[in-house]
C-alpha cells in the first residue's frame, strides 16, 4: 500500500467538507483556511477534549479567555517586538520575499544567490517582524499601532495576579486558554500545518522555583499520554529537544519558560507579580512550565494518523479510524433505499438517535456507496433500516473499522450505541 502524501489529505478535506481554502472563489489567500461542516465538528471535539483534560478534570488548572489585541507594551515586555523576526530577502525583479534560511540552508549572508522564482537579483538579508500590525481608533500612526497576538500565552501572564487573587490558588497551579493567534509567516505551507491565522491551546503552569524540572518531566509524560489516549499511535509521536534556531514543526511543545515572562512584565508594567509563599514567608516569582499546541496541527495529525486504505472484495476502501470522541458524525441513519415504506421507521430512528449523538441522515445513492462515504469521514456507526424492520422492529448497526453488523431492536438502539460511544 502506498503511503498517502499531503495532497491525499488536502483533497479528502476538500471533497468531504473538512477544510477549504479561505476565500477560494477569489483565488484564496496564502496561509488562511476555512473549516467546513465536518471540519468544525472535528476541531470542536479536539478543543473540548483538551479543555476537559487540562481544565475540567483537574483541580490545579483554571481556564480564561483573553483578547486578541492587547496593550502593545505586552509585546515589548515579551520580546516579540524586538526579536520575533526572521531574516528575509526580497527579489528586486518579481518582488517575491523569501526566508534567508530557505534559500541558504548553509547560511552565507554575503552571497544570497538568485531568486528561485525568476532568477532575479536579491536584496541583502534583513529582519522582518512576524506580528500582524493594525490600528486602534480612527487615526493611523505609531501611537495607535497594535498587534494581533502571535501567541495566547501572554494573556495568562498579564492575568496572573487577577487569577491568583480571585481564585486564591496555591502553587503549583495553571491557567489555560484556547484562542486564535496570528503570525505573518513568510513561508506558510504544508496545508494547515503552518498557517498565518491559527488556533492555540496553551497552559501556563506556575510552580515553585526548583521544582520546575520535575514538573517539566511530568507534563511531558502527561501530554504524551493525552495524545496516545486520543488514538494517535506511539510511533507517530517522538519526544525530543527542540533547538532555538529551527523552524517549529512539532505538534506540541512543552517549554520551561522559567520566571522570564513574569519578571519582564514586572519591569515593563511597574507592578509586582509575586506569589507569597507561607512556608518560607517570602515573595516568590514562580517558574512556568508551558504545554502549548496548535489546534490546526493537532487536527492534521489526528487525520493523518486515522487515515487508512484497505482492500475489501477487490475494491479500495478509504476510512478514517478516528477515535469515537473526535469523530464529527457519530451515527449515520441509513434507510436501505428511498422506498416510501422505509421513510416512517427511518425517521423514527432518526428522532431517537439525533438528540443523543451527532447524527447524519443519508438516503442518496446505493447503501454500499453511503457506507463508503461514512467510512471516509470516520463515522463509527451506521444504522440501517431495511424491509425486515417493518416486520421485526429491528435495525442493523454496522461498525466502521470491522464492518461487523449486528441486529438490534429499535427499543434497544440508543442504549447499545451509548455503551459503544461513551462521553
Ligand atoms: Zn524573482
Image (cartoon, helix red, strand yellow):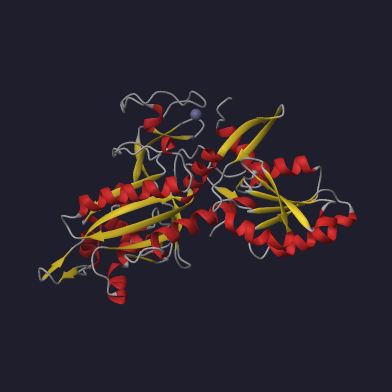
In which quadrant of the rendered view does residue 97 lie? top left
Q: Position of residue 12 (x, y in %)?
A: 63, 39
Residue that appears at 64% across and 36% down: 318
Give the vertical position of 156 relative to 406 (above or below).
below
The residue lying toward the viewer, choosing from 289 and 228, is 228
In which quadrant of the rendered view does residue 171 lie? bottom left
The residue lying toward the viewer, choosing from 205 and 341, is 341
Q: Position of residue 27 (x, y in %)?
A: 64, 42
Residue that appears at 81% across and 55% down: 389
The residue lying toward the viewer, choosing from 102 and 137, is 102
Extreme-front residue of the structure: 392
Q: Position of residue 204 (x, y in %)?
A: 32, 58
Q: Position of residue 40 (x, y in %)?
A: 59, 54
Does residue 412 appear anywhere in the picture?
Answer: yes
Give the vertical position of 260 relative to 399 (above or below).
below
As drawn, is 281 to the left or to the right of 356?
left
Extreme-right residue of the structure: 340
As drawn, is 152 to the left or to the right of 392?
left
Residue that appears at 68% across and 61% down: 412
Residue that appears at 38% across and 48% down: 225
Of the 4 image quadrants, the one containing the N terminus is top right
Does residue 36 appear anywhere in the picture?
Answer: no
Give the vertical position of 179 relative to 32 (above or below).
below
Q: How many marks?
A: 0
Amino acid at each position: 500500500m502506498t503511503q498517502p502524501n499531503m495532497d491525499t489529505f488536502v483533497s479528502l478535506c476538500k471533497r468531504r467538507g473538512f477544510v477549504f481554502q479561505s476565500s477560494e472563489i477569489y483565488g484564496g489567500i496564502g496561509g488562511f483556511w476555512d473549516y467546513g461542516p465536518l471540519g468544525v465538528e472535528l476541531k470542536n471535539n479536539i478543543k473540548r477534549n483538551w479543555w476537559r483534560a487540562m481544565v475540567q478534570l483537574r483541580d490545579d488548572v483554571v481556564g480564561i479567555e483573553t483578547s486578541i489585541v492587547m496593550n502593545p507594551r505586552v509585546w515589548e515586555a515579551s520580546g516579540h517586538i524586538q526579536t520575533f523576526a526572521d531574516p528575509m530577502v526580497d527579489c528586486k525583479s518579481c518582488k517575491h520575499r523569501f526566508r534567508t534560511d530557505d534559500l541558504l540552508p548553509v547560511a552565507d549572508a554575503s552571497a544570497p544567490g538568485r531568486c528561485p522564482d525568476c532568477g532575479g537579483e536579491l536584496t541583502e538579508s534583513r529582519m522582518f517582524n512576524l506580528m500582524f500590525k493594525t490600528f486602534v481608533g480612527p487615526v493611523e500612526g505609531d501611537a495607535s499601532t497594535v498587534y494581533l497576538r502571535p501567541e495566547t500565552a501572554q494573556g495568562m501572564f498579564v492575568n496572573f495576579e487577577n487569577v491568583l487573587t480571585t481564585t486564591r490558588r496555591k502553587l503549583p497551579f495553571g491557567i489555560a486558554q484556547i484562542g486564535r493567534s496570528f503570525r505573518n509567516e513568510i513561508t506558510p505551507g504544508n496545508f494547515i500545518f503552518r498557517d498565518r491565522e491559527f488556533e492555540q491551546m496553551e497552559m501556563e503552569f506556575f510552580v515553585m522555583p526548583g521544582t520546575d524540572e520535575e514538573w517539566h518531566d511530568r507534563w511531558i509524560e502527561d501530554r504524551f499520554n493525552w495524545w496516545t489516549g486520543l488514538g494517535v499511535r506511539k510511533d507517530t509521536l517522538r519526544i525530543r529537544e527542540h533547538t532555538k534556531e529551527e523552524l517549529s514543526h512539532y505538534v506540541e511543545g512543552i517549554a520551561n519558560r522559567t520566571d522570564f515572562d513574569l519578571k519582564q512584565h514586572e519591569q515593563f508594567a511597574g507592578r509586582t507579580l509575586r506569589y507569597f509563599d507561607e512556608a518560607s514567608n517570602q515573595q516568590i516569582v514562580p517558574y512556568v512550565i508551558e504545554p502549548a499546541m496548535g489546534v490546526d496541527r493537532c487536527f492534521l495529525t489526528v487525520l493523518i494518523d486515522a487515515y487508512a486504505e484497505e482492500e475489501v472484495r477487490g475494491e479500495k476502501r478509504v476510512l478514517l479510524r478516528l477515535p469515537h470522541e473526535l469523530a464529527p458524525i457519530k451515527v449515520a441513519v441509513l434507510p436501505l433505499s428511498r422506498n416510501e415504506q422505509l421513510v416512517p421507521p427511518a425517521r423514527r430512528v432518526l428522532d431517537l438517535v439525533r438528540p443523543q449523538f451527532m447524527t447524519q441522515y443519508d438516503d442518496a445513492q446505493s447503501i454500499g456507496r453511503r457506507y463508503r462515504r461514512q467510512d471516509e469521514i470516520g463515522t463509527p456507526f451506521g444504522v440501517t433500516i431495511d424491509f425486515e424492520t417493518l416486520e421485526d422492529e429491528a435495525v442493523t448497526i454496522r461498525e466502521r473499522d470491522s464492518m461487523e453488523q449486528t441486529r438490534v431492536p429499535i427499543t434497544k438502539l440508543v442504549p447499545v450505541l451509548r455503551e459503544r460511544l461513551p462521553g
